[in-house]
Image (spheres, rainbow, N blue to C red):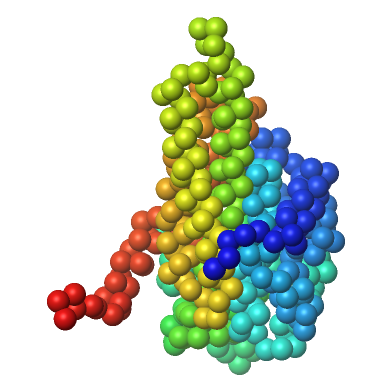
Amino acid sequence: MDFTTTDEQRALADATRGVLSRHGSPAAESGSSAQPPAHDTALWQALVELGIPAMPWSEEDGGVGAGITDLAAAATELGRGRIQAPLAETVLAGTLVARLAPAELRQQVLGAVSEGEALLVPALDEPMRTFDPTPHDVRAEEGADGWQVTGVKAPVRYAPAATHVVLTARTASGTGVFLLTDPGATAERLDLDGASVTLLAEGEAAEEALRDALAVAGALLCAEALGAMEEALRMTTDYLRTRKQFGVPLAAFQALTHRAADMYAQLELARSATLFAAMSAEESPVDVDAVLRARVVVDKAARLIGQEAIQLHGGIGVTAEYPVGHLSARLTMISRTWGSTRSHLATLGSRVAEHRSVDVLG
């Protein structure tokens, strides 16, 4: 695999950075990074005009037909700028629509998303449960008037602004994936009581599509985390060079520079894992395990870099006015989105038995 960034990807990153500088409101200004802000429609429309939400979908469906590696360049800038936007959410839900919906519905929904006329988000989590793509308490039944869903989905990021929601529910065949139009949510929670939905798939087809969509979105989360880690390291090294103690810059103390070097080493490991994950997400079939491995590597790096950035800044690192704490908080949230290091390792471990054994003595 070629890990070299293309001219097009660099240009997209520059364009995204320009849009974010004009329209974006960093988390330090708009509220806590640990909680998603209200949907910034002006920023999202600017990203739409840049073509970012249209990138993953085929031209037939109103998209651009670009790859996840290209989209990851934009996601990295979101992380660097401390900007929260529903990019990974849209890609996760849109990937399910692109894969499972009939052509007419697929073109209608993804075309509207690409034009900025619709906001599509996923609803996979259930309250009081650790994340599990398999639905538990939300159920769907088919009646004379079609499919209806009952239960609670929470948290559902950006639900108040969403025009369409892709959700999971239990059916007689197992897991079902459904499309809900006009959810009418006023909070990041969906209270469903016989809500009418459109079935996209159920059973094995739904479960396989969910695994792939989560992997694609997971690669984008890695890219966003990469941008946040790059910014945290940049701010930390700048601080060590300029902040003086005992009449000399902090960077003159070898113990501190070694800690910064450890941050850099973890960042480069995370960068390689992220690029490999983005490339793996473009494969057919999607290399889910490669993305899970990347999420483990990135989560480990994010924890070290976030904590060390705060520690090396001293007391200012934990103030609400200073960006480092917000970067660390966002990195923590990313590591808990759609799984955790523990769940990713458990999934990878469960597949060890599927690997072909090698007789080293044979």
Task: Give the x, y percent position of residue 195.
Answer: 62, 75
Residue at 52%, 76% in the rendered image = 286
Task: Give the x, y percent position of residue 171.
Answer: 47, 83
Residue at 35%, 67% in the rendered image = 348
Asked if residue 188 lies left or right of residue 309, the reply is right
Q: Quadrant of the N terminus?
A: bottom right
Q: Is residue 151 above or below residue 297?
A: below
Name the residue at the bottom extreme: 144
**Front in this rendered view, residue 322 or 145:** 322
Residue at 83%, 55% in the rendered image = 46
Task: Give the x, y percent position of residue 336.
Answer: 47, 53
**Front in this rendered view, residue 70 or 268:** 268
Task: Give the x, y percent position of residue 266.
Answer: 46, 45
Q: Quadrant of the C terminus?
A: bottom left
Q: Which quadrant of the figure has residue 5? A: bottom right
How many marks can you see? 0
**Front in this rendered view, residue 60 or 137:** 60
Residue at 62%, 60% in the rendered image = 4
Q: Is residue 244 above or below residue 98?
A: above
Asked if residue 293 lies left or right of residue 111, the reply is left
Name the residue at the front extreme: 362
**Front in this rendered view, residue 128 or 306:** 306
Res. 137 visible in picture? no
Res. 102 visible in picture? yes
Q: Is residue 239 above or below residue 175?
A: above
Q: Is residue 273 above or below residue 95?
A: above
Name the residue at the left extreme: 361
